[in-house]
Structures are given as C-alpha cells and as structure tokens.
C-alpha cells in the first residue's frame, strides 16, 4: 500500500497559518472593540412598545412640548413617563375609539399602569439626574436625538461613559439657554456662544467618579 | 529594646492588656482567616453548577441586559414626583417611651427614618432601635395572616368570632375578660381602655413590659410625696449631675435622647460652666462612660450609698426640719472603704455648693427607696423647678404585680378571654410565674403580635399586628407631648393596629385606625386644616403634662438587708445577677432584626448573642475567662452562657442581657418551626428571673465549664496597628486624646502636642486645588456616649449587608462606621473612651495609591470615591489603610444563601420583600468588591443638584451625613471646610482638634476634638 503523502498544496498551510495567526489578534481585537462597544450594541435599540406611540406625530407634527408628558424632567432625577391620565387628557375626545389606544383605555379603566419599555436604560450603578442637565442648559436633543422625527423611539447615542465624559470635559457646543431645552432645532447663535454661556452661568460639569456612581 | 512594652495605659480588650498570644496573632494578620480556610464554601462542582446557570442566562439574553419597564401610575397623585424622596412625620414608641420620627419614602416605600427635630423627646435624633425599625417592616418572617389554632384563617372569621365572643362577655358584665397590653402612651388606646372598662365593668386591663421604666419611680415618689409622680429632668440647667444607677442618656431611659443632647451640650470646655457628672453603678452604662467620676458598686449597695449621700448632703445644705429627718448614715461595710467615703464626701460638698443647679437621678430599676431619696435630695438642694420637675401619676400597681395577678386569675380559671396586644409574655414572663402553663388555662386567648411568636403559637387566635409605618397611631411623650403617626405603606402582610382590635370590644362596627385616632382628638382638632397640619408636623405644640410642686414627706430610714449592707466583694453563690434590657434586641422583640443582632454592643463589641459579663477580679476568682462556657444558677434555675470579662464592672456582679434564646422569633433570631428551623441566638435569661430577682439580686453561682467558645466580637478585629505591637502603649493615647479641664485651661492646644513629627512635606505638587467645596467632618470625643445609633443609621442609609455570626467571627463584618472603645487604667476601675471611626477621606490617601485598577479615586472636593464597578477585589487598599475602615464583600451577603447568584437570588418572594428596604440612592454591592464610608455622597450630590437647580449656594449644615443626623449628642459635624463660617470649619479650628495618625502624612479630612473631662479637684 502506498503511504499517505500530503498533497503539494499542503505546503502552503504554513504560510497560511502565519497569515491567520498574524491577522487573528488584530481581527479579534477589532471584533471586541467594535462589536462589544455600546455604539454597536446599544445605538439603534428600538424595543416594541405596548402602544405604537409616535413621537414624530406628537412632538414633531403637533409640536407638543416634551414637558407636557415628561413633566418632572426639570426638577427631578427621572424625566417620568406620563401617567395614563395624561394620554387621556386628549384621547378621551381625539381618536377615542382607535383600536391602537385600547391598552390606554384599559389602563384608565383598571387603574393598572401601562408598562412602557425603557429605551435609554442606564446600568443600575449609574445615577443620572435629568434636572441637573436640563436646568444647566443641555437640550433633550443632545442625548436623545431628534425625537420629533422618530415614529418609534430608538437610542441615538451610545450612552457610554466615554460619551458622557466627552461632554463633561467640553460642554460648550451642547449648551443653550434652559428655556430652549426642549427645542429640537435650536442652533447656537455664534461660535463663541457656548464658552460665554458656560462662563456666565458657572457651568463646571464634574468628572469625579461619585458624580454618577455612588 | 524589647518589642513589647509594659502594659498599656489604654487598651481595647483584656487580651491586649495581658498580651495574650492569640491577640498578638490577630494583630499580625491583615485579614483574620486565610481564604482557603473557608468551610462550607460551595464545592467546586457546586460552583460550576452555579456559574453554568449564569452562563446560560447570559447566552439567552444576548448582548443586552434584561428589558426594563417604566411603570408610572394610571393616575399619578398630585405633587408626586416619581423617584424622589418624600418625608412624612410619624411617631414610634418603645416600652411606652415615644419619640417623633421623620420617615423617608421613595415611590411609596419607606426606607429610612430620622428623628423629628420638632419633637421634644428626641430633637431630631434617633437611636439604633428607631433606625432599625425599617428592617422589621420588610421582614418576610413577620406574621402573614390571621391564625386560628395555628391554622390559616381570615380577618373576617376573626372579627365575626370576636363579635360573638365579646357580645357574650358584655352581657356578663365583662366578667372573665382580660386585656394585656404593652407599655403604651397612646391616648387612643387609653380612651379605648376607659370605654372598655365602662362597657365591661368587670373586665381587667393590665400592662406588661419586661423592662420598661416607671414602676419603681412611681412607688418611690409616692414614698417621698405621698402620691406617685413622674420625674422630668432638665439636664441642660444642671452643673452637677449624680446618677444613682441611672443610664439617663441611654436609649431605654425616658427622654434619653433629649437628656443626651443636653448633657453633651453642657460639656463644652470653652463654655463658662462645664457640667460635672458622677455615676454610681454596677456595670458600665453610656452615662458611666462619660462620667467624670464613676464608682462601680453592686446594684444592691446603691441604696446604702444613696442614704449616706442624703445624710451628708442634708447636713451640709442645712435641710430644714419641715423636710423631715434625713437618712441616718447607714452602717454598710462598703461605706468605710477609703475610695467610697472620699467620693461620698466630695460629692456631698459639690452638691451642696451647687444648690438649685444640681440633679440627682435614680435608676429606673433601683428600689423605691432610692427614688424617694433622690427626690428628697432634689428638694433639699432646691432643684425642683430648676433641674427637675414633677407631674402627677396614677397610682397603679407595678407591671410585675399586674402580671402576677393575671397568672393567679388564669390559674384559678377566672379568665374566659385574654386579649394580648403586642406583647410576648409566654417568652418574657419571669420563669417562676410559669406563665405558659397558666396561659393554657384561658378559654380563649387572642394574641395580636407582629410575629407568630412564642405567645401567638399557643393562642386560640393570632392576629398580625401592623408595623407602626403601616398604620395610624398616636403617642404621648414622657412630658405629655402628643405625637401623631401616619401610615407610609399599606400593611404588607394584612396587619391590624392594636387599637383596631380593641375597637371590636367597644364598637358595634369595625373601625379603622385612622378614624379611631381622629376621634380621640376630635375636640382639639375638629377643623380639618388644623388636623392636617398636626399630621404633617407629627407633633403637637401643646399637650404637655401639668407640672406640680409636691410637698416632701418624712421618709423612714431605709432598711438594709443581707448583702445591701455588705462589703464591696461578693463570693460565688452570693454573686449579684444584673438582668437588663438588651441594648440591641430590647426585651427580645427585635430578635429577628439582623441589623440589631449584628450591631456590636457598645462595651463588649459582641454581636449575635448575649454573654455573662463578669467583673475582672471576680472572673479571676471564678477561674473563667473570655469565651468560657459557664453555668449560671440562681433560685434553682440555670442557663449556660459564654463568659465575657467586663472591665469597669463592679466586683461580685454578673450582667446578662435579656431578650435572647428565642424559639419562635424567625429565621434570624431562631425558631423551631417546620421550615428551615434555626437555633436560637444567645440564651434566654428570663429563665433566671423571678419575683424576687426582677432586675438584680444576689444568690447567683457561676460554674465555669471546661469548654471555650469563639465569641463573635468585633473588638480586636480592626485594631489599629500603627507599627506592629511595638509602641501601642505610646500610640493609643495618640489616637484618643483627653485631658482634665484644669490641664486644658493651662494648655488649650494640648491635643496638638501629643504627637510631634517633622514637618510634613508633599513630594509632588498638589494635584487637586479644592477651590470649590471641601468636605470635612469633626467628631467630638467629649460628646460621644458610644450609643452606636450612628452605626445602624449608616447601615440603613448605605444598604450595608449583614454577614452573619460565622463571618463576624472571621472579621468580615461590613459596617462602614465603627465606634472604637478604649479602656484606660486598671481593669477593675477601667475608664472608657469612645472613638467613632468612619473613613477619614484622606487628601493623601494611601488606599488610592495602591489600587491597580483605579477603583478608588480622589474627587475635586476631597472625597475618596469608591467605584464598585471597577473594583476587582485585590484588597490592596484595605491592606494599606492605616485606619482599617475598608470592608470587603466576600459573598453576595444580600442574598439568602451562599452560592446564589444575584440573578436567581432576587427571583423569590422573600427576597423581593427584603429588597424593598434598599435605599435607591445607593448601589447594592455584590460579591468581590471593596466598600467603605463615602461621607454619604448620595446626600452631597442630591443637595448640590438641588441647590444649583435653584441657583443658590449650599447652606451650612444643609447636607447632613446619616451618622450626624441621628447622633443624640451632636458629636458629629459635617460641612464645607472652605466656608470659614461653617460649623465644621469653626470646630476644626478649635485648639483641641487633631487628626488621627497625622504623622503618616495622610492628611485626613476628619478632625477629632479631644475629650476634656471635668473631675472634681478634691478627688484629684
């Protein structure tokens, strides 16, 4: 019987292995770096909500101010999802029979709240405070994107710690008068506005760990 | 030079004083037990199973964590802001002593209580019992529903049965109806009592509380004034205070928190007058620990001492004949002791020199004669109306007598229906009464209790008692001030208020607690707005008891019997047994409260159990030492307990805390139920109690066995070891600095000269400028009474886990704040110094420099931040901390069992209830991370945000740390050191302020104020 011999092309495996071993660490690093980054895993997160509520319609087309529903945003840590009552303020009359609004009417009847799914979900060891940002002059749009154009809300930014710190280190380009906080289209009037506003209002975002972690 | 010096002048335990080899080994080791010695840890296979499960879970959920829901209300109540803290005034009473509290609630979930600053009994302070009350609220072992003969029943079954039963009793004129309540000050309960006795004229209404004060005082003031009176102290006005075995600053004393505040305020060495405190007591109390002069004598000798004091003071102060004859000087043998007679003479002179501004306080458990003599002394010294005042009391028999009469009636079969409200007499009645045997003879017994306890188990009916945070209530403070409590949460387990059950007796329809309380006060608070304002404040501005000036009667010379006239020592067999409330579990009612079980007892630092505390010389004579199991026998009864030697305790005494050895407390305190039975914590000292030996008495014999046990103390675990054992003698006086008032006046900055070191330079330029807020704290060692309320407050605020007895023995307790107790001087007459020790938040922090992952970082305001999610558990930081304030999570202690993962452990009902106590502002730490005091950074951040939102500066003392807020004496101050007008900056600038281990160049942010004592110059 003829002994088994490796075919000629097998000689190439050594070179090939060299290439694979050389490329693999780079590939793996890149895979983890980008694949596990919040930019990849979290940005674009768009869970299905119990009611197909359209921010594009309400906040965009109808122009309802964010604070009509998220009314604790400028005085509390949580922006607060609106209670069912808030929906029914209008929908008792408008589209009162829409089948899509059935969970809302049901909630109003039973007193059991609607279970909205959290889109911007921070880890439990992060203590984010909405009021601290909104009253300083950070607009909703800076973190949440153009909600007025989202039919279903999705996560626009990565909400990673590095992303938070970018702004905490240089908040200038995100600053605006607190009165314009909910304005989705507001633009800084001049390139120097941010620096001047920051100085005038003594805005010094801390970068200490205990600012957010306690 | 020998590495070990002579015996130290300050010491933490006798082992240290004696240089016990075991102690030396403890100091050598950083962490007491090497990791590989962990018994009972999950085996490797088990570990893989557990981890396998969590890997699987990780796989299922993909790259994202669990989907989170946002659930608001369907109709949000007006003014409600989700996730924000709300504060509601309420009131709580323990043994009839009421305080006002302010409960913090998040989204309808009360998680923390603080003192109500408007309430006169506590002035914003709270003790460990109040602080731990929220844990009881969420205790899944609390009774889950009505029981009939041990079987599940419904409230409506009970109310129907009760209605029928009570109807029958009513037609019989109430014959056979007995109501046994706890010590209570509730005006509503008092009104219901009155109504019950009107509608059931032959019914009996009795009161039981194993340890509450009041009985001897009523009897004693009756001896002195002809009528029973209540004593009201005003310690703030007193220059000389004499305590005859009274822990008048302690938690179980009427207005103890208020007294502590007043006494501490009077101990400012810079004030024109500093008070002087003499304490005569058998065993260490909080008052004794801050005394300028303390005499440790057996409790039975206090009577003779009081009589001798009366003789001496009356002669010096020139007591008029209208006050009756003074006590003749008793011929007790111990009075001829040089030390005793010298103190007696000096004390009498000091009192006579401070007429009108002195104060004599008798201990609540001392016999009536001592109270009578104290009353007489206060009259003779002109203190009435100044430092002490009186109000009239009803003449009722003592609670012990009331319980005896109940047992007699039970035994003779006269009791048809016995309603027990909130008490557990089957457990807490003295052994010689055989209450359990008699209780079985009641035809129908109804126990309204929080737990299915020893009494509820053998009752015909059991009704769960609502927690005070679950229902409406009203209380009257010791001075009569009305307090109103409102519910913060609906009863979690269907509990009913005691008043709701009593109302079944008096009313035709079921009433709820709210209407009952409102009805009681309908006259004074008819107007809704007025009523709402009262509920909001939680305390009424009026309602105080009317003060009277009673006329002193002649008091017969006291009779001294047996040991009462003896010498200072007592032999085995004639030893004195002291039975007292436990500073942690009170009379046993908080046996299932793990915060209190794990709280180190102030003096012994013992957790999880009680011990026989024996004076050093007596222990030596008995041949017993720390941890020796001993049999304590008196009057034919005996129990076994480990011995602990108690420096400073009177020779011939043995002190045992009541409240342990529960057999039906719950999983924490011990129960013998069907599901996961647990052994009782400690031993039941009620077994040694009798009518004769109620609070103390002689005739005890101690028999030391051969075996020794390992006590779960935190005493030597975190011993500061500056540079090994060498030099401890020099170093401890550097840690706790004290001087007499005279020495202080001569050299006010003595504390700064205790340690001399070369100038401390920085190797590098300051990385942080601290130009904004610069947080700092001061702790006044002259004010601390060692009550440990701060420890429990810290635990409640910061979600600190309980680790259990086994882990305490391994030195793994997690309490962020400890109160170091140093003894000084000779063992028999040891003095005590307290030193609360939180993280010192060093500017030049040794912990920060060794963390390999940057998990502990310095902030721009000077805090040492601990970042849990970065920590990988090397524990280098704890190793490098000279103050030993860092704590490590060896397990997921918040879960029920070792080996559970957070994902699985949370998914059961028990845990869901338990988790409700967590403060949502603070991360709950998991296994493998380091933690430590943060200066309550969550309070700092929230206040900073609130202030800046309102565009204003943070006010001084606007931020209070949890320990500071609850401190009865105001020993802790916190604030911004950069604000020179702040309280903390002013205190830091005092001459007697010093930093702990400043010579290490750590530059700590906590300043200690050296303790200044005010000894009588005559006593040297």
Image (cartoon, coloured by chain):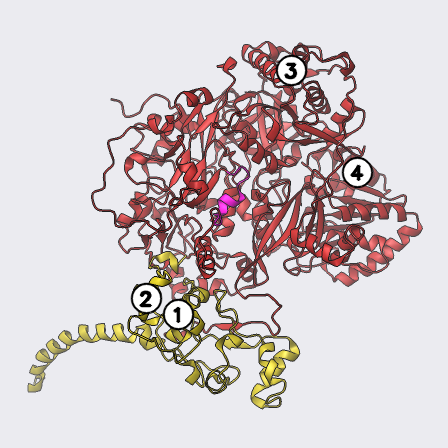
Chain colours: A yellow, B red
Q: Secondary structure at mark 3?
A: helix
Task: Specify whether B934 is left or right of B141.
Answer: left
Q: Are marks 2 and 1 in contact (CB under 8 Å)?
A: no
Q: Earlier in the sequence, mark 3 or mark 4?
A: 3
Q: Chain of mark 4?
A: B
Quadrant for the N terminus of chain B, please: top left
Task: Label the magenta part by its dominant secondary structure.
Answer: loop
Front residue (pair A196, B562): A196
- Answer yes or no: are tags 4 and 2 on the same subunit: no
Q: Which residue is mark 2?
A: A196
Front residue (pair B695, B59): B695
- Answer yes or no: are tags 4 and 1 on the same subunit: no
User: Within the magenta stretch, is there residue B969?
Assistant: yes
Q: Chain of mark 3?
A: B
User: Which is more foreground, mark 4 or mark 1?
Assistant: 1
Front residue (pair B79, B417): B79
Q: Which residue is mark 1?
A: A138
Q: Which residues are magenta?
A: B958-970
Residue at x-position 37% and y-position 27%: B749
Q: Are marks 3 and 4 in contact (CB under 8 Å)?
A: no
Q: Which residue is mark 4?
A: B407
Q: Are marks 3 and 2 in contact (CB under 8 Å)?
A: no
Q: Is residue A89 above or below residue B403?
A: below
User: Which is more foreground, mark 4 or mark 2?
Assistant: 2
Which numbered circle lies on residue B309?
A: 3
Spatial CA distance of label 1 from label 3 is: 73 Å
Residue at x-position 74% and y-position 13%: B320
Q: Residues within 10 Å of mark 3 (few under 14, many from 20)?
A: many
């Amino acid at each position: 019987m003829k002994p088994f011999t490796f075919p000629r092309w097998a000689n190439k495996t050594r070179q090939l292995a060299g290439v694979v071993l050389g490329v693999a660490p780079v590939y793996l690093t890149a895979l983890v770096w980008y694949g596990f980054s919040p930019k990849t895993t979290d940005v674009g997160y768009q869970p299905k909500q119990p009611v197909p509520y359209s921010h594009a319609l309400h906040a965009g087309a109808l122009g309802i101010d964010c604070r009509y529903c998220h009314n604790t945003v400028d005085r509390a840590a949580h922006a607060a999802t609106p209670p069912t009552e808030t929906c029914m303020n209008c929908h008792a009359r408008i589209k009162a029979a829409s089948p899509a609004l059935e969970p809302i009417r049901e909630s109003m009847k039973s007193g059991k709240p609607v279970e909205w799914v959290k889109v911007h979900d921070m880890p439990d060891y992060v203590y984010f405070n909405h009021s601290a940002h909104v009253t300083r002059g950070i607009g909703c749009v800076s973190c949440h994107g153009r909600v007025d154009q989202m039919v279903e809300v999705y996560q626009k930014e990565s909400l990673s710690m590095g992303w938070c710190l970018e702004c905490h280190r240089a908040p200038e380009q995100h600053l605006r008068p607190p009165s314009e906080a909910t304005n989705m289209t507001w633009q800084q009037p001049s390139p120097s506005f941010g620096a001047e506003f920051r100085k005038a209002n003594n805005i010094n975002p801390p970068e200490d760990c205990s600012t957010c972690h306690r | 030079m020998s590495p070990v010096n002579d015996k130290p002048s300050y010491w933490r335990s006798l082992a240290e004083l004696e240089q016990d080899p075991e102690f030396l080994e403890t100091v050598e080791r950083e962490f007491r037990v090497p990791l590989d010695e962990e018994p009972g840890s999950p085996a490797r296979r088990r570990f893989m199973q557990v981890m396998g499960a969590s890997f699987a879970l990780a796989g299922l959920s993909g790259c994202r964590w669990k989907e989170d829901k946002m659930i608001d209300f369907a109709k949000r109540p007006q003014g409600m802001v989700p996730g924000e803290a709300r504060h509601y005034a309420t009131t709580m009473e323990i043994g009839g002593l009421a305080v006002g509290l302010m409960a913090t609630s998040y989204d309808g979930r009360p998680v923390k209580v603080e003192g109500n600053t408007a309430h006169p009994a506590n002035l914003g302070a709270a003790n460990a019992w109040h602080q731990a009350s929220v844990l009881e609220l969420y205790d899944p072992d609390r009774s889950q529903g009505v029981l009939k003969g041990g079987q599940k029943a419904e409230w409506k079954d009970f109310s129907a049965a009760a209605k029928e039963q009570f109807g029958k009793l009513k037609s019989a004129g109430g014959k056979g109806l007995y109501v046994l309540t706890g010590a209570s000050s509730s005006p509503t309960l008092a009104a219901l009592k009155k109504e019950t006795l009107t509608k059931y004229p032959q019914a009996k209404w009795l009161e039981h509380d194993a340890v509450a004060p009041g009985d001897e005082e009523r009897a004693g003031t009756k001896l002195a004034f002809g009528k029973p009176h209540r004593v009201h102290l005003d310690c703030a006005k007193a220059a000389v205070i004499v305590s005859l075995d009274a822990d008048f600053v302690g938690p179980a004393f009427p207005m103890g928190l208020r007294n502590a505040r007043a006494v501490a305020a009077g101990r400012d060495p810079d004030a024109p007058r500093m008070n002087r405190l003499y304490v005569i007591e058998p065993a260490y109390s909080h008052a004794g620990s801050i005394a300028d002069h303390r005499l440790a004598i057996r409790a039975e000798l206090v009577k003779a001492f009081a009589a001798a004091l009366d003789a001496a003071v009356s002669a010096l102060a020139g007591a008029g004949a209208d006050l009756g004859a003074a006590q003749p000087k008793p011929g007790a043998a111990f009075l001829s002791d040089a030390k005793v007679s010298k103190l007696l003479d000096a004390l009498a002179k000091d009192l006579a020199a401070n007429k009108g501004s002195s104060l004599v306080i008798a201990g609540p458990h001392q016999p009536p004669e001592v109270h009578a003599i104290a009353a007489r002394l206060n009259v003779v010294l002109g203190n009435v109306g100044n430092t002490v005042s009186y109000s009239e009391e009803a003449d009722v028999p003592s609670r012990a007598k009331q319980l005896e009469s109940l047992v007699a009636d039970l035994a003779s079969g006269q009791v048809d229906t016995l309603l027990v409200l909130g008490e557990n007499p089957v457990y807490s009645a003295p052994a010689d009464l055989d209450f359990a045997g008699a209780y079985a003879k009641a035809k129908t017994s109804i126990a309204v209790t929080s737990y299915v306890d020893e009494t509820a188990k053998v009752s015909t009916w059991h009704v769960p008692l609502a927690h005070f945070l679950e229902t409406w209530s009203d209380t009257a403070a010791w001075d009569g001030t009305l307090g109103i409590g409102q519910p913060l949460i609906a009863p979690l387990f269907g509990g009913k208020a005691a008043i709701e059950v009593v109302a079944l007796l008096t009313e035709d329809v079921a009433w709820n607690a709210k209407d009952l309380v409102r009805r009681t006060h309908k006259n004074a608070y008819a107007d809704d707005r007025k009523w709402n304002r009262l509920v909001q404040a939680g305390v009424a501005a009026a309602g105080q008891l009317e003060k009277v000036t009673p006329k002193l009667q002649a008091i017969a010379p006291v009779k001294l019997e047996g040991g009462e006239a003896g010498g200072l020592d007592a032999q085995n067999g004639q030893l004195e047994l002291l039975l007292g409330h436990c500073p942690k579990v009170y009379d046993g009612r908080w046996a299932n409260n793990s915060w209190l079980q794990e709280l180190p007892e102030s003096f012994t630092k013992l957790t999880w159990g009680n011990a026989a505390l024996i004076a050093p010389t007596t222990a030596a004579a008995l041949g017993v030492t720390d941890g020796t199991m001993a049999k304590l026998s008196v009057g034919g009864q005996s129990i076994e307990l480990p011995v602990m030697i108690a420096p400073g305790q009177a020779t011939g005494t043995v002190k045992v805390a009541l409240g342990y050895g529960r057999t039906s407390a719950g999983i924490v305190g011990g129960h013998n139920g069907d599901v996961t039975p647990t052994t009782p914590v400690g031993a039941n000292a009620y077994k040694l109690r009798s009518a004769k030996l109620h609070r103390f008495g002689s005739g005890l014999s101690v028999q030391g066995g051969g075996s020794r046990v390992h006590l779960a103390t935190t005493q030597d675990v975190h011993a500061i070891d500056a540079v090994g054992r060498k030099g401890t003698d020099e170093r401890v006086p550097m840690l706790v600095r004290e001087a007499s008032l005279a020495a202080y006046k001569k050299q006010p900055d003595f504390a700064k000269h205790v340690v001399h070191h070369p100038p401390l330079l920085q190797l590098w330029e300051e990385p942080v400028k601290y130009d904004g807020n610069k947080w700092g704290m001061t702790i006044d060692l002259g004010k601390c009474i060692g009550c440990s309320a701060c420890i429990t407050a810290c635990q409640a605020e910061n979600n600190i886990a309980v680790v259990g007895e086994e882990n305490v023995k391994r030195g793994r307790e997690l309490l962020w704040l400890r109160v170091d107790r140093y003894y000084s001087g000779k063992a028999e007459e040891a003095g005590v110094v307290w030193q609360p020790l939180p993280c010192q938040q060093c500017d030049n922090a040794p912990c920060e420099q060794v963390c390999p992952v940057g998990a502990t970082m310095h902030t721009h305001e000077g805090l040492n931040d601990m970042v849990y999610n970065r920590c990988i558990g090397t524990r280098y930081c704890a190793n490098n901390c000279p103050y030993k304030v860092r704590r490590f999570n060896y397990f997921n202690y918040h879960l029920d069992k070792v080996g559970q993962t957070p994902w699985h452990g949370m998914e059961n009902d028990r845990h869901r209830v338990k988790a409700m106590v967590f403060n949502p502002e603070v991360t709950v730490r998991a296994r493998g991370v380091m933690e430590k005091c943060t200066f309550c950074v969550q309070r700092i951040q929230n206040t900073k945000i609130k202030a800046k939102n309102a565009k204003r500066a943070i006010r001084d003392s606007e931020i209070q740390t949890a320990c500071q807020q609850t401190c009865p004496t105001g020993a802790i101050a916190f604030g911004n050191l950069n604000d020179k007008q702040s309280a903390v900056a002013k205190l830091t600038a005092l001459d007697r302020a010093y930093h702990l281990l400043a010579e290490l160049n750590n530059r700590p942010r906590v300043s200690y104020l050296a303790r200044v004592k005010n000894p009588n110059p005559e006593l040297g």
